[in-house]
Image: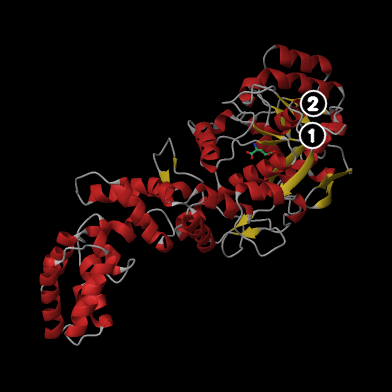
Amino acid sequence: MSKKVRVRFAPSPTGGLHLGGVRTVLYNYLFARSQGGDFVLRIEDTDQSRFVAGAEQYIMDCLKWCGLEPDESPEKGGPFAPYRQSERKHLYADYAEQLIDSGHAYIAFDTAEDLEKMRSEHKTEHNTNPQYDHRTRGLMLNSLTLAPERVAELVANGTPHVVRIKMPEHETITLTDMIRGEISFDSSLVDDKVLLKADGMPTYHLAVVVDDYLMKITHAFRGEEWLPSAPVHVLLWEYLGWKADMPQWAHLPLILKPDGNGKLSKRDGDRLGFPVFAMNWTDPKTGDVTTGFREMGFLPQAFVNMLAMLGWNSGTEQEIFSLEELVSKFSIERVHKGGAKFDFEKAKWFNNQYIHKTNNETLAQLALPYMEEGLKKARANGVLEMALLEKVVGLVKDRCTLLPDFWAQGHFFFLTPATIDEATIKEKWNEQKKQFFGAWTTALEQQTEWNEQAIETSFNELAQLNGLKKGDVMLPLRIMLVGGKYGPGVFIIAEMIGKKETIKRIKAVNL
Ligand code: GLU
């Protein structure tokens, strides 16, 4: 019987969640769902020096917002709890011990100064960055160079020490990656990574292998930046006697800067004016806020769809996929090897498509905070009628790309425009038009039927009577009601803002 598919997202809670991280979550999620497997969230927080308050909760909130919730997590629990590595500290030392006993790891007592000294002494033109490895380990203070009694003594008297893997010399380490195929590494080029730190905590390398094993992970999806660590992990699986259970690896392509020049970073987002994090992230130390896709006005479904296409395609022209469709269509074979360039305009296109698809009731709820904020800024009182807002979002949604656009495109339904583009009206203004609007407002006062059709008919008839083309007076009317040259049909706007307000806005423009 084949094993149940189990995948994991294993972030270190050190700050905002980069969109590449969310894509890793997504591919994990899609794979698990398509295979009837489990999706685990494991928090890799063994590096106390990089601990950032609030980052774990933030990650969980991002997953919730995206609708990519794990089956097992620190919050939810599960059969392999705890899911926070700091709470599993007691588990790792035994495995480090096992590796020492089998000769694959050793204890090292070197201080930070010792390491510095080694680096400066061994630095040559050909070796600009000397490592703690097969070339240097014999010169350092460790259980390979010291007598066993001395090692026992140092350990007994509490001398700080770490455990390092003993990387073999000139061995070819091979792994088969689901995306890249077979990849080989020369073991001599990899340093003797620390496995267990002086504070007794494992490093990422030991913890990731032990936990993937204990949590019965079958497939491991992670960013390409982890590829250089893979040979260490493969050896640990082997040295711990678990090779047969090693997960299948998939190293996902990088998400690149828009120009394709290197990995997309938070700084690129700041520089080019687009978000890189899923949601707003507030740095607890500096208080600096980095804007997220959510706060910029993205719908989570659009964000997720956009991410799915950054590194994968269905083999067809189709670009819009619901999460269910993605689950049924996603396949690792169609994940690209090369990096995917991030394109903010394309991201906005996805959002616009989703706004178009979403029903007005849901959209009104999503737009509500932006409308309330707009009204608050304008110091306008009063309650926002949801029924009216639903109608408004229905009218303007095709003009909206991001949720704040609902205010920009629809504020005039709720407020008299603060500014009117009178300059544009003036360009083609004349006495005849002035008289027309004067006469029309008088006619409107008498108008009993107030709906789009009736308003338009009265407008057209009067224009004709005055020898004006409808087109000549439509633009001024629009600007009077809206403030500028935009918005949905002008007569539906008049209907919705009401007779009194329509007349008031026309009269306010006194040229
Ligand atoms: N803790 C690693 C990270 O922060 C996980 C890498 C992996 O998935 O193995 O991304």
Between 25 and 511, the residue placed more toward the observer is: 511
Q: Where's ligand 1: which quadrant?
A: top right
Pick the quarter of the image with the C terminus. bottom left
Q: Quadrant of the N terminus?
A: top right
How many other residues sit within 10 Å of disc 2, few (<14), some (14-19) or many (≥20)?
A: many
- Residue beneath disc 2: 106
SS for tag 2?
strand
Residue 219 pos. (x, y %): 76, 39
Q: Residue at x 48, y 30 (%)?
A: 53
With 496 as the anchor, is 267 left or right in this view?
right
The residue that disc 1 covers is 137
Label 1 sits on what residue type? Arg
- Mark 1 crowdedness (10 Å alpha carbons): few <14, some 14-19, many ≥20: some
Whether residue 286 can be seen here: yes
Under circle 1, the secondary element is helix
Q: Quadrant of residue 137?
A: top right
Q: In this view of the protein, can residue 131 be seen by the observer?
A: no
Q: From this view, report whether residue 436 is shown above or below residue 393.
A: below
Which x, y percent locates residue 223? 67, 46
